Structures are given as structure tokens and as C-alpha cells.
Amino acid sequence: MNIKIICVGKLKEKYWKQGIAEYSKRLGKFCKFEIVEVPDEKAPEKLSEAQMENVKKTEGERILSKIKDRDYVYALAILGKERSSEEFASEIENLTTYGRSDLAFVIGGSLGLSEDVLKRADSQISFGRFTMPHQLMRLVLTEQIYRAFMINSGSPYHK
């Protein structure tokens, strides 16, 4: 199984990198795991609606260039479907059972995802209506992917 997280921007803080590195290492026994970073589009603090759409479109093109045709794509979106950890684990298990072994999770930039990325997504997933820093979301997502594998393997980690 191949899993990648495609995200906008770079991690700078050491503590985010360390947390993600730990779960990435743990995931190594279950799948090939990678994080693909695409550059964020530089923009002034205050943007018009049209400028915001242009930023999302540019970042979206960068994201789409990292998605392969065979990838099953989850877009992280506030309005996406919320799942429990058990539901998420079951979904991943079902995907692999039916031949979907390449999963891509997409975390957009600070303005969100472009319509083109949302259209390409096979599913939208939400971690609730809270707004979180993208760095934290990367860590939370990585842990939840690891948790899904632990649930599916019958490990007590989840308890």
C-alpha cells in the first residue's frame, strides 16, 4: 500500500517535524508513506475574492500535478464527511480489499482547496468544524492513518 499526504507549504518548527517523523516511522511496517509538499502561493494579507481564487487555483494546480490517475484521493475539507477512527479504518481496509492501494490525502493552503482539487477528490474528509493550523492537521492526519492501521491489525493502541 502507498499513502501520501500532499500539502501546501513547508514545516518549519522542529516539534511538528518530530511528531510526524515518529508516526511516519511507525507507518513503515504497514505501508510506503510519504509527505509531498508543494509551495504555497505568496500573497498579501488582504486579498480580494478574485485574488483568493487565483491563489487557490495556483496551489490547486501544484497539488493536482502530484496526484496520479490511480490515486484514491481524500480532500481534507471542513464541509467533508466526519468519520470516527473505526469508520476511517474500515474505509481504508475496504479500499485495499477492492484494489485501491494508492491513497492520497490533500491538505490545502490557508485559503483552502480549489474547486478543481475538490472535484478530483474521491472523498472529502473533515476532522470537525474547527480551524486548525495546517502543521497541526498534518500531524493529526498522520496519527489517524497510523491509528487506522492499528485498529485494522487488532492492536490495543486504539483503546
Image (cartoon, rainbow, N blue to C red):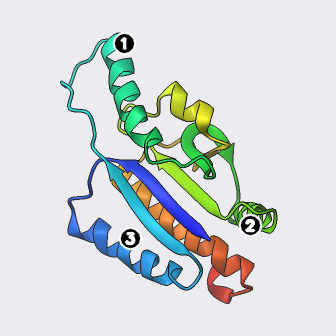
Kindly report the distance in space between the C-alpha atoms of the residues bearing marks 2 and 3: 23 Å
Residue type at mark 1 is: Glu
In the rendered view, does 63 fall on the left or right side of 120?
left
Front residue of 59 and 52: 59
Residue under the image location 60 percent in, 48 percent down: 74
The residue to which callout 3 is attached is 20
Mark 1 Cα-neighbour bin, 10 Å: few <14, some 14–19, many ≥20:
few
Q: Nearer the viewer, mark 1 or mark 2?
A: 2
In the rendered view, does 44 fall on the left or right side of 29?
left
**Residue 90 seen from this side:** yes
| Residue 149 coordinates in the image, percent (x, y) | 65, 76
Quarter of the image where one finds residue 135: bottom left
In primary-sequence order, the first of circles 2 and 3 is: 3
Front residue of 103 and 140: 103
The residue to which callout 2 is attached is 96
The residue to which callout 1 is attached is 49
Quarter of the image where one finds residue 129: top right
Q: Secondary structure at mark 1?
A: helix
Mark 3 Cα-neighbour bin, 10 Å: few <14, some 14–19, many ≥20:
many
Residue type at mark 3 is: Ile
Kindly report the distance in space between the C-alpha atoms of the residues bearing marks 3 and 1: 34 Å
| Residue 107 coordinates in the image, percent (x, y) | 45, 47
Mark 2 Cα-neighbour bin, 10 Å: few <14, some 14–19, many ≥20:
few
Q: Secondary structure at mark 3?
A: helix
**Residue 159 seen from this side:** no
Residue type at mark 2 is: Thr
| Residue 132 coordinates in the image, percent (x, y) | 41, 47
**What's the mark number on residue 57?**
none
Residue under the image location 51 percent in, 47 percent down: 67
